[in-house]
Amino acid sequence: MVTPLNNRKVLELKGSDCKKFLQNLVSNDINLLDQGLVYSALLTPQGKYIADFFVVPIKDGMRIDVHSELVKTLLDRLNIYKLRSDVEIKEADISVALGLTNPPEGALGDPRHPKLGWRFYSKDAKKFDQNVNWTKLRVDYVIPEYGSELTDESYILEMGFERLHGVDFKKGCYVGQEVTARMKHKTELRKGLVKILSQHEISNGEELLLDDKSIGSILTTYGKSALAYVRLKNRDAILSTNSSKKIVIAKD
């Protein structure tokens, strides 16, 4: 099944400095482009989320597959850092399609999880207009998305970017690297994104309770399962909401 991702836009970067330019900014190693898509993020100097995206290898440059609502923010930030680098950044007339089976020629595997299939880039991706239940996939495999789980207050390690192959700890400096490395090596994560399982259907925005005290919130639901942002010390506890009396955090 394939469906155009209508909430995605594609930027194109060209110029002799574009690889070095992006390598010095983003959380993942751009040298991995020779293996396919690279999932990465741009952070603030304080290590907080600005945008997540896929970097796409092309001849003589690269593309960035990003949520449409983040295009202006990402363009503005990239242009701030560009200075005198030989890099041209523009929006490309390219659509994005997501598929799970029978990939067309030129499709690239989603690097976050093997069950997420592949992504395909072309001007006519709309001809593959079939349904994929993206919400179910995101909940099943704990995949954060901008506007639901990822906000300007998010830290990428709390959102699972290490598990999703979205950060590299050996590449060297990038914007926000110091905070991210400290969270990895010098502290234990106190909060994080998890999958929860309920006896009853639950709703977005409900608070998760332990002994009537809030320990997190439900962000994206699918039936009796959901993604939630919680205090990780409570991962083995029986939780509740106002609508469900027994909720557990799914094991890894």
Image (spheres, helix red, strand yellow):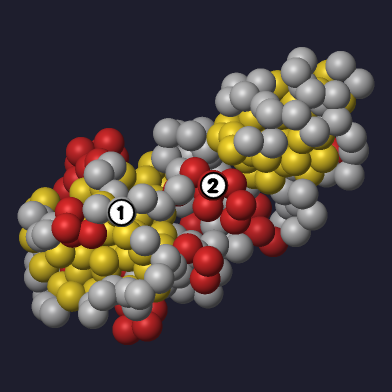
What residue is rendered at 35% in x and 75% in y? 102
Q: Residue furthest bottom?
A: 34
Residue 74 in view of the camera: no
The answer to whether 99 appears left or right of 61 in the picture is right
The amino acid sitting under disc 1 is Gln
With respect to residue 206, does 90 lie above or below?
below
With respect to residue 213, does 96 lie above or below?
below
Q: Position of residue 86 (x, y in %)?
A: 10, 66
What residue is rendered at 61% in x and 52% in y? 140
Q: Position of residue 184 (x, y in %)?
A: 66, 59
The answer to whether 80 appears left or right of 202 in the picture is left
Local SS, label 1: loop
What residue is rendered at 20% in x and 38% in y? 72
Q: Quadrant of residue 16?
A: bottom left
Q: Position of residue 113 (x, y in %)?
A: 53, 66
Q: Which mark is residue 246?
A: none
Q: Are there few (<14), some (14-19), or many (20+) residues within 10 Å of tag 2?
A: some
The answer to whether 107 appears left or right of 100 in the picture is left
Q: Quadrant of the C terminus?
A: bottom right
Mark 2 or 1, which is nearer the eye? Answer: 1
What residue is rendered at 79% in x and 54% in y? 251
Name the foreground residue: 250 vs 182.
Answer: 250
The amino acid sitting under disc 2 is Lys
Local SS, label 2: helix
User: Label 2 belongs to which residue?
Assistant: 136
User: Label 1 belongs to which residue?
Assistant: 130
Name the foreground residue: 103 vs 214.
Answer: 103
Tell me how far mark 2 sits from mark 1, CA to CA: 16 Å
With respect to residue 161, does 247 lie above or below?
above
Which callout, 2 or 1, points at the residue further toward the start of the chain? 1
Name the foreground residue: 201 vs 157.
Answer: 201
Q: Position of residue 12 (x, y in %)?
A: 14, 60
